[in-house]
Every structure is written in structure tokens, then in C-alpha cells.
């Protein structure tokens, strides 16, 4: 693809700008059609003794902060970092941040996909403007803390392109690991193949595509009653905030739009929420009971059980019962990403990267970890914080201030070895919120599960929920989008339209997760 080749050309030319040798002839050879593959080009560069990537900064350069990841923690850090002190280099397979609290609303057309995605260049403009700051669409494959290097591999568009993944290195003065987490499957067979998660924009796109496709297929003459019920059975596994909010959005969609626009099959579609224990276990008991009552009233069937196996058209519970489905959404929590597991750093309980009170990895120099990928070491005496957006955002803000503080004197590699970092990170829980559909929500302002505090439920909570998240959306542009989307949905209903494009499997094979997610800003709603 022409645009992607231009992206690689721009990024790669900047990667080797510090080298003494002229690289123009090499880049021209690599990026023009020829029999010279990228791996062969890389081998040629290595033979010439040239450094493929960003070399260590020189005295006349600003110190370099490398950020791995574009989630809540990484983006909040990049937003707060002082680019007069540091050059910022971000490496991620995703070129935008996802406002996850509103992601469930995009699945049924309440919001457009672009309303919940913020480009990295808008969060930290220096990445697009400053000569020493970059964003690289790539995955980090290895971290070498002794050489102060990260090894990366570009995200390509798979079979649709002749480009092979391009491997390169980046030297850092300070490294911030903000890789987030990946969905937990607990080793259950069939989850990865047949279920859809709800953590990225392309997940929401796939859920919407599959939901609307099943609605249309069920109306085709000759489809049996049993097959209609299966196609229109939406199963959500996991009773946390994400699973409950999606179930609420889906039930609203069914009652408000499906019953009007798909009257022939309106009696077949229903939602089942499966949870091993109590739904919304971190909320107040009274709020949990209220949520269960309202979800049941909205037509959501609550099932307590443990999934044992997932088949193409049904899942099997531990008691042997079978649950047929047309759409399966999996939301059972998160665990460490593969690179986090493989990294040779000390681990906190739960397998996350262990950090001290200042969010620093104590076993090495100049490496910090924030967000869902890190947890306090047992030696700190602090509990591992929950994998929440407000935790990640608070850590990103704290670390940005800390790096800005030490930057003038200790910003260089090994420059902060003997420095005092000052006040350690302290997290204070501000409360939890969740919408349950039908203009109702839960607001729990307790600091912890056993603590005391205000807890609200109903329409007032729903208004607070919407107001709070509208103000938390990163840019004024997206706030405007969200407000307009909510208003148009209230007046005209959801915009439900199906594009008969590729399925999730072929999209991921042909485009790769990073590029497929990166194209959402031009995807219609």
C-alpha cells in the first residue's frame, strides 16, 4: 500500500539520521519494487556496520523517553511529558487511544467509532512536529535494559502487502513500559477462535457486524425456528462492568430499535449474561441487587455458571448444560501481555512487572512501568492495584511529573542513579460507575469494597455517569462528537447499517490488528 510505504520511508529515514553514512540509496532500493526483500536489506545494513534504528542520544540532543503502548497510562504520560526537556518516542501497534468506558456504546450504534478514538498525534503534538520525537507503528519484541535498548518489529498489512516486517532497535535514556494487559481465557478451548473480546475498536466493529448480520440472516425464508433462536442469542461471559454495560446497551438496542426495524424476528432475540459468582462484585451489595433486578427487567437472562468449553455454535458449562449462541462476547478480566510475561524483570503477585513506590523497576536502571502491566512488589507492602482506567491514568500523570522533575539533571541514561525521587505514588480510589441500560446506572463512591461512602442508582446516577465521562473524553473534538451522537440517537435511534466486508478472521489475517485498528477513523458508521 502506497501510504504505508510512505509511512515506513518517513520513519526509517528518521531512524538512521544520526549515522555518518548516506542512507538514501539504501532506502530507495528497499522501498522501490525489486527482488531485494526487507530482510536482505537489513542484512546488508548490518554488514556495512550501520545501526538500524535510533542510536543513543548525544550530548547536544535532548534525553529520549521511549514509551511502549498507547493505552490510558502511556497516553496520559505522553500528554504530560515536557517536550522541552525530552524527545518522546512511542512504539505501539495502535496509532490511537481508545476511550474504553464508552466502547460498548459503539457496538450498537449509540456512538460512532471515531468518537472513542483519539489519535496519538493529537495527544502529544511533538510526536508529529519535533525532529527527535516519533511514533512507530510496531511491536516491541524484546527489552535489553543493560544496553538501554528496545527491539521492535513493524506492523505490516500481511498478505495484502509485499513488505516484510522491518526489525529495528531504539536506544533510550528512560523507558516507560505501558503495554496494558490482554483478555484472560483461563485456557478454555475455543475462546480465541469463536468469542469476541471488547477492548479495541475493531472488537466493537466485529460485534456490530456479527450482530446485524445475524439479524438479517434470521429473516431469510427457510431458516428453522431453532436456528433463528441460535442466531439471535447473544451470550456475554463475565459479569464485570464491561460485561454488564454491554448487556445493558444490547438490551436497550433490542427494545428501542430491533423491535421496530426487525419486527419479524423481534421475539427470537435475547441476551444471556453468564458469571461464575456475583455480577459487579466490586460494587456495593445494594447496587448489585439493583443491577440484577434491572437487567432481568430489561430481558437479560442472568446465569451463574462456569464455562468449560466453547464450540463454534454453542458453549458448554461445567454442569454439562449447553448454551447455543449466535454472538459470544468474552469479558472475564485481563492478565499480563506476552512481552510482560517474557521480560526478565521481577514480578508482582499476578505476574505483572514489579515496581517500587516510584513506579520504577528496581532491578535495572531507567526503566519504569505503569498501567495494567505493573504491580507493586511485595517488598513495598502495598497491594497490587486493580486494572482500572483511573489507576493507569493517575500513574501516567504521576510519572510524567516525576520525569519532568528529574529531567534537567538526571534525564540521561544512568543519570538518576543516585537521585532522590521525592514523594512516592499514592493511589486514592475515586469510585466506580457502570450503566445498566434504560437510562439507569450505578455510582459507587466508596474508597474500597468494605469502606463507607455514597452509593447511588437510577436515573440520577445515569446522568452523573454520562456527565462524568463526557468531561473525561480527551479532546474537545471527541466531546462534541459524543454529545452529538447521544443527541441524534435519542431523537432518531441507533444508526444500524451493515457493510458486507471481510470477517474478523480475514481482516486480522490481511491487515493485522494494529493496522485494522488504525483505519477506524475513516470507517463509516
Image (tube, helix red, strand yellow):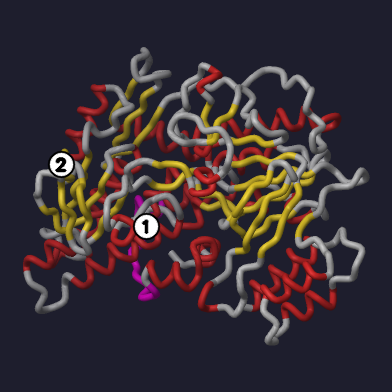
Q: Position of residue 175 (x, y in %)?
A: 69, 41
Q: Are marks 2 and 1 in contact (CB under 8 Å)?
A: no
Q: Quadrant of the N terminus?
A: bottom right
Relative placement, left or right, of 122 versus 349 is right
Q: Residue furthest bottom?
A: 34
Q: Residue at x 55, y 71 (%)?
A: 157
Q: Position of residue 450 (x, y in %)?
A: 34, 15
Q: Rounded to the nearest whole Å, what is the CA distance between mark 2 and mark 1?
A: 27 Å
Q: Position of residue 52 (x, y in %)?
A: 76, 62
Q: Residue at x 42, y 38 (%)?
A: 466
Q: Residue furthest top?
A: 452
Specify whether residue 106 is painted magenta. Answer: no
Q: Residue at x 34, y 57 (%)?
A: 192
The label shown at residue 303 is 2
Closer to the camera, 3 or 374? Answer: 374
Q: Quadrant of the C terminus?
A: bottom left
305 over 211 or under it: above or below? above
Relative placement, left or right, of 369 versus 409 is left
Q: Position of residue 30 (x, y in %)?
A: 73, 78
Q: Which residues are magenta?
A: 486-502
Residue 303 occupies quadrant: top left
Which residue, given by chain and number where applicable, does mark 1 sit on?
109
163 over 401 or under it: above or below? below
Q: Residues within 10 Å of mark 2 (few under 14, many from 20)?
A: some
Amino acid at each position: 500500500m502506497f501510504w504505508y510505504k510512505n509511512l515506513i520511508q518517513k520513519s526509517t529515514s528518521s531512524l538512521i539520521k544520526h549515522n555518518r553514512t548516506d542512507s538514501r540509496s539504501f532506502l530507495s532500493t528497499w522501498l522501490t519494487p525489486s527482488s531485494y526483500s526487507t530482510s536482505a536489506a537489513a542484512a546488508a545494513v548490518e554488514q556495512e556496520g550501520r545501526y538500524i534504528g535510533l542510536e543513543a542520544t548525544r550530548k547536544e540532543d535532548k534525553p529520549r523517553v521511549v514509551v511502549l503502548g498507547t493505552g490510558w497510562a502511556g497516553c496520559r504520560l505522553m500528554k504530560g511529558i515536557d517536550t522541552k526537556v525530552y524527545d518522546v518516542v512511542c512504539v505501539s501497534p495502535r496509532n490511537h487511544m481508545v476511550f474504553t468506558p464508552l466502547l460498548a456504546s459503539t457496538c450498537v450504534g449509540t456512538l460512532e467509532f471515531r468518537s472513542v478514538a483519539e489519535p496519538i498525534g493529537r495527544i502529544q503534538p511533538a510526536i508529529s512536529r519535533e525532529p527527535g520525537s516519533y511514533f512507530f507503528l510496531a511491536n516491541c519484541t524484546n527489552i535489553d535494559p543493560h544496553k538501554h535498548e528496545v527491539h521492535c518489529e513493524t506492523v505490516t498489512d500481511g498478505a495484502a502487502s509485499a513488505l516484510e516486517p522491518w526489525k529495528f532497535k531504539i536506544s533510550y535514556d528512560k523507558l516507560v513500559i505501558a503495554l496494558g494487559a490482554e483478555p484472560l481465557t483461563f485456557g478454555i478451548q475455543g475462546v480465541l477462535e469463536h468469542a469476541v473480546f471488547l477492548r479495541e475498536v475493531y472488537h466493537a466493529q466485529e460485534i456490530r457486524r456479527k450482530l446485524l448480520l445475524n439479524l438479517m440472516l434470521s429473516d431469510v425464508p427457510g431458516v428453522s425456528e431453532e436456528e433463528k433462536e441460535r442466531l439471535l442469542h447473544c451470550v456475554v461471559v463475565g459479569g464485570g462492568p464491561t460485561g454488564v454495560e454491554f448487556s445493558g446497551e444490547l438490551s436497550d438496542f433490542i427494545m428501542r430499535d430491533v423491535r421496530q426495524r426487525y419486527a419479524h424476528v423481534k421475539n427470537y432475540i435475547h441476551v444471556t449474561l453468564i458469571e461464575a459468582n456475583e455480577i459487579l462484585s466490586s460494587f456495593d451489595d445494594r447496587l448489585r441487587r439493583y443491577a440484577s433486578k434491572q437487567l432481568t427487567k430489561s430481558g437479560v437472562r442472568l446465569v451463574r455458571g462456569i464455562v468449560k468449553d466453547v464450540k463454534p455454535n454453542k458453549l458448554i458449562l461445567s454442569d454439562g448444560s449447553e448454551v447455543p449462541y449466535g454472538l459470544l462476547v468474552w469479558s472475564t478480566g485481563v492478565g499480563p501481555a506476552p512481552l510482560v510475561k517474557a521480560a526478565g524483570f521481577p514480578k508482582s503477585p499476578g505476574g505483572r512487572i514489579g515496581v517500587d513506590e516510584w513506579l520504577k523497576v528496581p532491578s535495572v536502571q531507567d526503566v519504569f512501568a505503569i498501567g495494567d502491566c505493573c504491580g507493586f512488589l511485595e517488598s513495598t507492602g502495598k497491594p497490587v492495584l486493580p486494572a482500572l482506567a483511573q489507576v493507569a491514568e493517575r500513574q501516567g500523570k504521576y510519572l510524567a511529573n516525576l520525569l519532568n522533575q528529574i529531567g534537567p539533571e538526571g534525564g540521561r541514561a544512568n543519570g538518576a542513579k543516585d537521585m532522590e525521587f521525592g514523594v512516592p505514588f499514592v493511589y486514592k480510589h475515586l469510585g466506580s460507575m457502570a450503566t445498566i441500560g434504560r437510562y439507569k446506572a450505578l455510582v459507587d463512591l466508596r474508597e474500597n469494597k468494605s469502606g463507607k461512602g455514597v452509593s447511588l442508582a437510577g436515573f440520577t446516577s445515569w446522568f452523573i455517569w454520562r456527565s462524568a465521562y463526557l468531561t473525561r473524553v480527551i479532546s474537545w473534538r471527541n466531546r462534541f462528537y459524543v454529545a452529538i451522537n447521544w443527541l441524534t440517537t435519542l431523537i432518531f435511534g441507533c444508526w444500524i447499517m451493515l457493510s458486507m466486508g471481510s470477517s474478523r478472521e480475514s481482516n486480522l489475517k490481511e491487515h493485522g490488528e494494529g493496522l485494522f485498528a488504525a483505519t477506524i477513523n475513516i470507517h463509516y458508521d
